Image (cartoon, coloured by chain):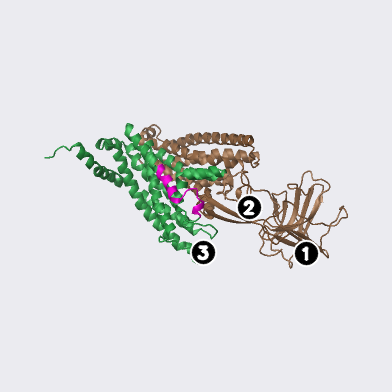
Chain colours: A brown, B green
Amino acid sequence: MQPGLMPWSKAGILIKQDLSQGSAYAAMMVTSGNGVRMQWNYTGDTPGLSGAVSAASPRWLRLTRDSDTITGYDSTDGAHWTQVGAVHLAGLPSAVQAGLFATSPQYIAISTSFGSGNVNNNQTVATAVFDHVRRSGAWPAITWTGGDIGPATEGIQGFSQGYHQAAGRFTVTGSGDIAPAIPGPGNGNEGHEPIGFFLAGTVAGLIAVIVVATMFMTAEYRRGLIRTTLAVSPVRGRVLAAKAIVIGSAAFVTGLAAAVGTVIVATGEAHASGYSLWPVPWPAELRLIAGTAALVAVAAVLTLAVATMVRRSAAAVMLVIVAIVVPYFLTFTAAVPAVIGEWLLRITPAAAFAVQQSTPRYHQVQAAYLPGLGDGFFPLAPWAGLAVLCGWAALALAGAAYLLRRRDA
Amino acid sequence: MSLPLSAGQRSHRAWPETLHAEWTKLRTLASTGWLLAGAVALTVAVSTAAVAAAAVAPGVDLAKLSLTGIQAGQAVAVILAVLAISNEYSTGMIRVTLTAMPRRHTVLAAKAALVGGLVLAAGAVTVLASVLAGRLILPERGFTPANGYQLLSLGNGPDLRAACGSVLYLALVALLALGIAAVVRDSAVAIGTVLALLYLFPIAAAVVSNHHWQRHLEQIGPTTAGLYIQATAGVHALPLTPWQGLGVLALWAMGALILGGLVLRFRDA
């Protein structure tokens, strides 16, 4: 492979159920920037030998089949082989397609300005040279043929996908990717959103919950009721804990009802209007709903704690909104460059919105994984994002408990 | 010997007195100074971070990029405006105020003038600092005349419009907040309502996939339309001209103030 390719430009050998899009496969490949990999069924990926590959330092790849188990091996010299992985392709027919491939994913350039982000996808091309191509076992005695697999490539001038064979050397050129489709307009999948996209209204409900949770504490201070409350239950930490449990539970139930309602209505409307929702497996859908409820509940507890510390409605509402809603807003509307947006969604309480990411991010698939363009991708894993919010809430609760105990009411 | 003032003299003197009274109240609120400083600091910090992380790409609007912080800083201006009125309700001071100055719309007008003036002053400082940060940092990020990017300059018509417009934008957002606070009275509810109004239109516009609806949402949203004033690139592609956009925000602010004035006039304090 040549320098200047995409890190996930790849070439190698492949066994595939048939030539249709989406059929089962397993492949051994060399990549431009990620060493040897074994990949299967679009989302599977295991590393093999690392290091750059060149004509001077080639790699040997082997796939063996035993019933519906495919085992991949790699080697630097063709004599000493290491097993990379063995995968089970359920229901693999006895007659399969096998071949050489080369392909290179799109190059993505992202520019953002307020209210809009532009993603420029440029096709790239990879060319690979193979030699010592051998088959062993019960293969039919036919020669290799070359062709394009998958949808036609557009937008590359002066290039044709190609296959060339001479004196046992095969030159294969290709463009595109063997990978799962990623939703979002940045990936050419506009108007075909996963269900998590329709939970975008959460932020509106969250503002209302923040106001209610603030008043749950500040109303006590404003009316002087806090003195009565603390006279009746002098263990102040317990008062705070009880309030946190009440507001957290109320917010959780509210968030749960809102999320379930949204999912049911959005799915029903999509069916009724013929809108094709991006498929999301049910565990992920369940996580979207439960995660949204948890996000609202923990945000309510955080608000309560902040309100206990600052005691004034205005200051509490502002602090929590600046901490949660503003980072989400700045990133979501692409008001700040994507680099800053990613950091905001890592360290601020807004990280918890990661629970609303419907489809996974694949490290081995080059795509526009942006939160800002409606694609709904977050830098942290769903539960890790929620953990960031929980951390902030725990910190605020500790501060609130300390101040409530130390301060005159 | 002092003579009782006639009705005409009383109304003639009402304005300066009301302004003076409101100024005393606003000036002596502990939060006012902190909030003004906070608005300036937050805006300049976000703007500086945005220009420091910017990368050369087609279609980057340097003036808008340098003024990114306005979108965060407006939240603080909102609090300042809301507190100017809701604090009076939370302490019961409003009853004293309205007894001393029975012309209720004058009270609201005086508050609007003072809050608007303060935010204009803080906004001017903020915008100047943000533009300065943009002018100093952007060339280091590759936005040089050699690469086809003009240096940010207030001597340049569109940049001047973006800068002055952003100051006016902040003041109008504050007036919108003041009007809503006069209607709902409670600070938490007022802040929640105003910030929802400010931040939800852009989010809704980003989510709606129908371009027709998206355009409409952007045209009527106080933030989306109001911030057209910051555009210096691709102005012709906008659904409204920059000044029309700011006009939409002005309508929102005026509507909120009129509603606030009416509610204040006809409701028991």
Q: Nearer the viewer, mark 2 or mark 1?
A: 2
CA gap, disc 1 to disc 3?
52 Å
User: Residue under circle 3?
Assistant: B148
Q: Nearer the viewer, mark 3 or mark 2?
A: 3
User: Residue under circle 2?
Assistant: A367
Q: Are marks 1 and 3 on the same chain?
A: no
Query: Which residue corresponds to the image point at 37% horizontal and 45% vertical from the top-left?
Result: B80
Query: Magenta residues?
Result: B234-252
**Could you tell me residue A139's position as x and y percent?**
86, 53
The type of residue carrying mark 1 is Asp
Secondary element under disc 1, as helix, strand or loop, is loop
Label 3 with label 2: CB-CB less than 8 Å: no
Report in which chain the residue with disc 3 lies: B
Report in which chain the residue with disc 1 lies: A
Q: Which mark is residue A77?
A: 1
In depth, the one of A46 and B51 nearer the eye is B51
Which is the main secondary structure of the residues drawn in magenta? helix
Q: Nearer the viewer, mark 1 or mark 3?
A: 3
The type of residue carrying mark 3 is Gly
Residue B192 seen in the figure: yes
